[in-house]
Image: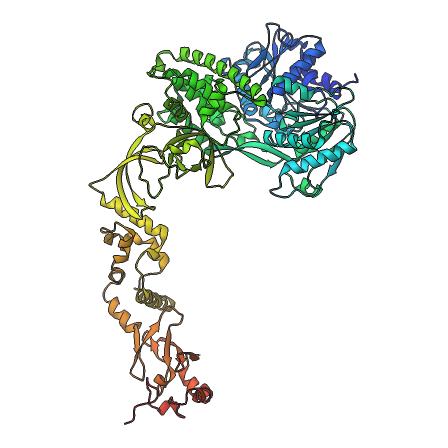
Amino acid sequence: MSALPIESVLPELKAALGTHHQVVLEAPPGAGKTTLAPLALLQEPWLQGQRILMLEPRRLAARAAAERMAQLLGEAVGQTVGYRVRLDSKVSDNTRVEVVTEGILTRYLQNDPSLEGVGLVIFDEFHERSLDADLGLALALNGRQLFRDPADGAEPLKLLVMSATLDGANVAELLGNKNHSAPIIRSEGRQYPVQVHYSDPWQAGEAIAPRVINSVRQVLATERGSLLVFLPGQREIHQVQQGLEETLGNNPDIILAPLYGDLSLAEQHRAIEPAPEGQRKVVLASAIAESSLTIKGVTVVVDGGLSRMPIFDPKTGMTRLDTRRLSRAASVQRMGRAGRLQPGSCYRLWSASQQDQLPAFTPPEMLQADLAPLALQLQRWGVEDVNELEWLDPPPVAPYQQAMDLLEKLGAVVEKKGTRQLTPHGEAMASLPSHPRLAHMLIMGERYGLRQHACDLATLLSERDPLNSDSADIQLRLDLLRGECRADGRQRATVQRMRRQSQQFQHLCKQASARLGRELKALPVDNPDDEKWLGFLLACAYPDRIAQRRASRNENRSDGDNKTGSNLQYRLSNGRAACLLPRDGLQRHTWLVAAHLGGHRGQATDRIFMAAALAPELFDNELADLVTTRQQVNWDKQRERFVAEQQRRVGSLVLSSQALTQIDAEAKTRVLLDLVRDRGLGLLPWNEPLRQWQARVDLLRKLDLERGSDCEWPDVSDNTLLATVEEWLAPYLANIHHLDDFGRLDLANILLALLPWPLPQQLEQLAPERIKVPSGSRIAIDYTQSPPVLAVKLQEMFGCEATPTIASGRLPLMLHLLSPARRPLQVTQDLVSFWGNSYADVKKDMKGRYPKHYWPDDPLNAEPTARAKPRKP
């Protein structure tokens, strides 16, 4: 076999690790770093008698790396080279290279921060920046500083960070001390040329499966060799597999091989191994095949360009699987799969211009993941401030605080003297290899004698849903897991793996029970088979996802079951909305616990995929810690009324309520003022005269301000009134109980009280509501226009030599001189000019239209009239 590229830098790597305690190794895919670097370091003098721990981000990659290294040594796995992953391990007393998944390193460090007996820790594929990898590196650095510092005479722990695409300078600076960075060794690799083909632009919302199926058919017709097809996840893999089976028929020359994490070990090997002589393989893979694996015989990559990743939403406290465009770095990784063994081709199912628009790198999981597992491990490590540790990207403040709040709700931490400390319950949770929610549920299962139920539920919630059903009832999944209903061909391997997982959880629960001892406070239940305990256990894990059915109009809030199933909408204790599919049998229950929810970012309502009914009587005893009692004084938006109740609540949900007989007046006033601020002054009974009054006061205020004189007039604009409601409106709200009561307020007198004496009299003098015109009529002035408008019939102004004014003659009114039909004939603030210039033309036009009306030749000496013509003397 020809030499692999990494072999040329192995002497440099040995030398660097001989003189430094940390090194960064950059090598492209296929260079051989994963399998050759650990073996090359086994005989180094500084490692004698010690082991190498190598971290891989995925179980499949860990097994494959161990098997390949054992094969190179001519040994079986478990001798010199072994592995340890969830549900599977092959190690022995002779094992010196142990390949592990990242969570296992964290457990090793927690049990022994010094990692005694380990001389080197290798972080492989570190560019993936998983949460466990960042945590493992931070703990390893801290543990080394505390227990393996050579300055104290200790045997140093060496660290090697390996990656294909990595910002090596930043990692080297993190690994080194403040004065010296870690050395960086680069292998140029041996990437055979790969010809890249682009497609038509990818359209937003386009289904991926049809495009991939068509592309694979065309590539099979034009290319040789096996194909590696990248798809977002299992659903798309199954869709494409089914489509290709229908399209290709029973072609014996082509093997379709799915590849993803939940497959059995035999099925994964089938996908990785080369195709038999004379056959071709089409491997339909998730992102698991981006790195660490060499799939033999592959010379063509078909890249769908999408990747599915878990994204934590702090607003909802839930993690969603989000399908996104991959990064440019990931696209290069995928392309490299085609050129590992010989020249190849890569078909990207998007355009070249879209390639340039891809983000440079995939964001670190630290910046978009649920930080509860990390927070629990840091508490167990004894970290009070996350900045005590060295991070490439420190945990974001808000999500980390939210994670700590969850741990406190689960009883894992308690606040003492201003700091949060891990409880014995939290210590036991941290020892379990599961999310803190499930760890809490497992321990509560031990406490109540429900170990089997808790372990089965933890297994179901740790894995992908094994049942393709429109019903969210988790009991159906338990029946499948326990063999009470038959599993089909695809489900069988999954169910077997899940049963082993449940057994492992039971073993771990026994250990946790022994560790807690008296702290466990066992409270075994009388009838463990009662179905209500499923809801209880799920409520332990997901107290923020307890769900109460929204009451229909013809329903009242009760704890009974809904016999009609008329409403599928539920409200969660975290305030979110969720729903079941129609005809789901769970809809008859008023109370549920939603263990698995899904939806799209920005959606107001999530879909419930997995849940159990919850018996409300549990809130009286077993779940009493979740119940709070408080006085609720607020505005009920649904009933549009003020409510003062004493409520028993679970988060945002109301268990029961009782009206308060004595209401704090100040609290009520605050609620009503907040309502006015929220909905605006339109809530009050405004009318046209009040709006005119507001405009009159505003006008006089502006005139005083323009003159620069002391202004006595208050600011009564909407903005100021809204900002000062507590000053002028609060005293009048005592009798407000319903929304309609606002309409009964005497708003005129409330506003008039804003004018101190003698401003009300001055208002009438300076800005009167009406003004007397020459005809004797008193015409209303419109102050809502600027300047104020006097709309009056032209005939009523005969004999008036000057434009009428207000504000002691300071402001001429804008005259709208109207026709007999009350349409404007002239708009002017200069009445004298109108009589002398424009009146003659207006008279000529109007006299023809309205011959019965009075159109004198000399308007200044004519008699004004509100009639068609003046009365005869």
Q: Position of residue 125 (x, y in %)?
A: 63, 24
Residue placed most toward the observer, 320 or 151: 320
> Is residue 434 visible from the viewing direction of this image?
no
With 193 as the anchor, is 660 left or right in this view? left
Q: Residue at x 33, y 49 (%)?
A: 675
> What is the quadrant of residue 250 in the picture?
top right
Residue placed most toward the observer, 805 or 330: 330
In the image, is residue 611 above or below residue 155? below
Q: Position of residue 810 (x, y in %)?
A: 35, 75
Q: Residue at x 72, y 35 (%)?
A: 347
With 98 as the anchor, is 345 left or right in this view? right
Q: Position of residue 11 (x, y in %)?
A: 73, 16
> Which residue, as the protein is rendered here, is positioned at the far left?
661
What colour scheme governs how the chains and residues are painted in the rendered image of this protein?
rainbow
Figure quadrant of the C terminus = bottom left
Q: Position of residue 335 (x, y in %)?
A: 71, 31
With 605 as the anchor, is 741 left or right in this view? left
> What is the quadrant of residue 634 in the picture?
top left
